[in-house]
Amino acid sequence: MEVEFLVRKDGTTSQVHAKHAPNKQIESAVAQNIESWVIDPSRPNGAHVEEMQKAKIEVSCMAFPSNEEALCTLQAK
């Protein structure tokens, strides 16, 4: 799936938009996870700036037929 998000001057993230998620539940979980990220912001002229970033995220889930929930992992590409 593809995500786009804002990296603020302090490195926190917001305004997460996900595309091509298998379903809304995974889209929401991925967005919530990315909103907890802290990233080293860009410094084009030595000062931190806010900017939109894009990333490809691989989502892998595993579940057993007897279990109603699955365990999913995210990997940024």
Image: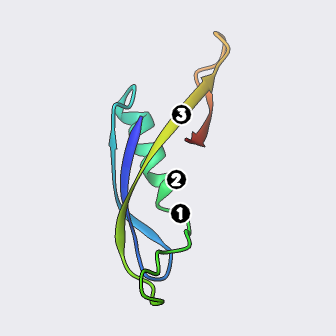
In the image, taking residue 4 as reference, residue 42 lies left or right, namely: right
The mark that comes first in sequence, 1 or 3, is: 1
The mark that comes first in sequence, 2 or 3, is: 2
What amino acid is at disc 1?
Ser
What amino acid is at disc 2?
Asn
The structure residue drawn at horizontal position 54% and vertical position 32%, both measured from the top left corner, is 59
Above or below residue 3? Residue 15 is below
Q: Residue furthest front?
A: 45
Q: CA distance from mark 1 to mark 3?
A: 18 Å
Looking at the image, do the residues carrying marks 1 and 2 touch, with CB atoms under 8 Å apart? yes
Per the image, the residue denoted by label 3 is 58
Q: Nearer the viewer, mark 2 or mark 3?
A: 3
Quarter of the image for the N terminus: give it: top left
What amino acid is at disc 3?
Glu
The structure residue drawn at horizontal position 46% and vertical position 53%, both measured from the top left corner, is 32
**Could you say which disc has been placed on residue 60 in the image?**
none
In the image, taking residue 23 as reference, residue 41 lies left or right, namely: right
Q: Residues within 10 Å of mark 2 (few under 14, many from 20)?
A: few
Per the image, the residue denoted by label 1 is 36
Q: Element at badge 1?
A: loop
- Coloring applied to the structure: rainbow
Quarter of the image for the C terminus: give it: top right
Q: Nearer the viewer, mark 1 or mark 3?
A: 3
Q: Element at badge 3?
A: strand
Q: Residues within 10 Å of mark 3 (few under 14, many from 20)?
A: few
Residue 15, x across and y down, in percent: 32, 62
Q: CA distance from mark 1 to mark 2?
A: 5 Å
Q: Element at badge 2?
A: helix
Per the image, the residue denoted by label 2 is 33
Q: CA distance from mark 2 to mark 3?
A: 13 Å
Looking at the image, do the residues carrying marks 2 and 3 touch, with CB atoms under 8 Å apart? no
